[in-house]
Structures are given as structure tokens and as C-alpha cells.
Image: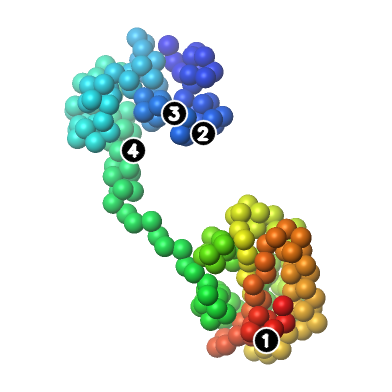
Amino acid sequence: MSIKFLAEDDRPREKFALKGKSSLSDSELLAIIMSSGSREESAVELARRILESVGNNWHNLSLLNLQDLMKFKGIGEAKAISISAALEIGRRKASQEVPEKIKISSSVDAFKVFHPRLADLQTEEFWVIFLNQNNKILGKSQLSTGGINFSLVDLRVLFKLALEFSCSAIMIAHNHPSGNLKPSQADNAITKEIFEAGKILKIQLLDHLIITQSTYFSYADENLL
């Protein structure tokens, strides 16, 4: 009896997709790792039997070597390796610290994020960083790349990404390959458009930086927002 013949609510993969990973039991998660059971029992039943043998404890299961796992009927070398690999991933994840999100407290902080990406380019690029309510970076994205002295930005793309990140604020930046820090009329126009669109969506534009090889111009520092 394979997974595809089970009732829909009992199919681990389908259940994962429809109801989310937290809805799955331990045996269902292990069944997904194994992919299939044997002629006598489904993957879920086999997984349940394996877990029961170790007291339904993932740590105890991780102590079993390949030969121990292969003693269970229906577990060959490939499945044993899949189980051991998944448990090793879990072990490594548990040993790692969750990386701290970078907090942006000033235009200097934003410059440090944007500068490595923009300083030495020969054409203009436009970038955005997405921030949570504590001004910590959720993500960053390149929005456009242009010619020698221009860069086009699609507001629909920008705010689609912002909504996907569920961000509270954004900072934008683009480079001036010429080294001129003075904002152009086009720079001012796109800044205003993004600022006004952000107000409607309650996503605050905190700053717009113009980056050159060694320094920057900040709209926020110049009180232009």
C-alpha cells in the first residue's frame, strides 16, 4: 500500500502542501523522507514502527547507524542514508545560531550596505532594502540597471516585493558613475513617486541614497523627504 492509495488527508506530501508542515505527525515527516514503504505496509506505517522502536524520540533515532536502520524490513541502503542525512541536517541546524538581522539606524548604516554593490559600477543600478518595524533588514533587491546616466524603476515591482517581505519601511539607492552627488530631476521625481506610493500602502520610505565611489548623498539627511 503506497502513499498514493491512502485517503487524501493521510498523504503526507499532500497534507504538507495543503495544511503546512506543522500539521504533520513525526511519522508522516519521516514517511516523506523515506518516500515509500514496503509491500506489507505504507511509508507512514513503516515510519511509525521505526519511531516506536526508539521511544518516538528523534535524538534516539539519530543514534542509529545505517546497519541499524536497514534491519527494518522496507529500509534499504538508500532510505537509510536519506534518514541519516535528514537527521544530520537537523543536528547541524540546531548547532547554528540564527543570524542577527542588520539594523539600519542612519544613512551611514545604509551606505555600508549599498556601497559594496554600487560603488564601482560603470552604469546605474537601483537597489532597495526592505526593513521591519525595528529597521532591521529583511532582504534586498536590485530593481533595475540602466545606461550611463539613467535608471528606470517600476513601482509595481518594488511594492510587490515590499508586500512579499511584509516590510514596514524601505530604503532605496542608486549610483552615479560620474561621481556627481547632485540629484537629478529624474531622481527627485522617482523619490517623490515612491514616497507617495509608500504612504498609501503604509510602507515608509526612510531614505534615498545616491552612491559614488567614495561617498553618498542622503535625501533624509538633507530633509528632502
Looking at the rendered image, the disc whose residue lies closer to the viewer, 2 or 4, is: 2
Q: CA distance from mark 1 to mark 3?
A: 53 Å
Q: Which colour assignment does the render follow?
A: rainbow
Q: Position of residue 120 (x, y in %)?
A: 57, 81
Q: CA distance from mark 4 to mark 3?
A: 16 Å
First in sequence, mark 4 or 1: give its number: 4
Looking at the rendered image, the disc whose residue lies closer to the viewer, 1 or 3, is: 1
* Secondary structure under the numbered disc 2 in the rendered image: loop
First in sequence, mark 1 or 3: give its number: 3
Is the N terminus in the top left, top right, bottom left or bottom right quadrant?
top left
Q: Which mark is residue 222?
A: 1
Residue 94 in sight here: yes
Residue drawn 38% across the image and 56% down it: 98
Residue 77 in sight here: no
Please tell me whether residue 163 is drawn above or below residue 219 in the rendered image: above
Q: CA distance from mark 2 to mark 4?
A: 19 Å
Q: Residues within 10 Å of mark 3 (few under 14, many from 20)?
A: some
Q: Nearer the viewer, residue 63 or 203?
A: 203
Q: Amino acid at mark 2?
A: Gly
Q: Nearer the viewer, residue 41 or 193?
A: 193
Q: Amino acid at mark 3?
A: Leu
The residue that disc 4 covers is 86
Looking at the rendered image, the disc whose residue lies closer to the viewer, 4 or 3, is: 3
Please tell me whether residue 53 is drawn above or below residue 219 in the rendered image: above
Q: Amino acid at mark 1?
A: Glu
The residue that disc 2 covers is 20
Q: Which mark is residue 24?
A: 3
Q: Position of residue 111 (x, y in %)?
A: 55, 79
* Secondary structure under the numbered disc 3 in the rendered image: loop
Q: Position of residue 154 (x, y in %)?
A: 75, 63
Residue drawn 74% across the image and 69% down it: 195
Q: CA distance from mark 2 to mark 1?
A: 47 Å
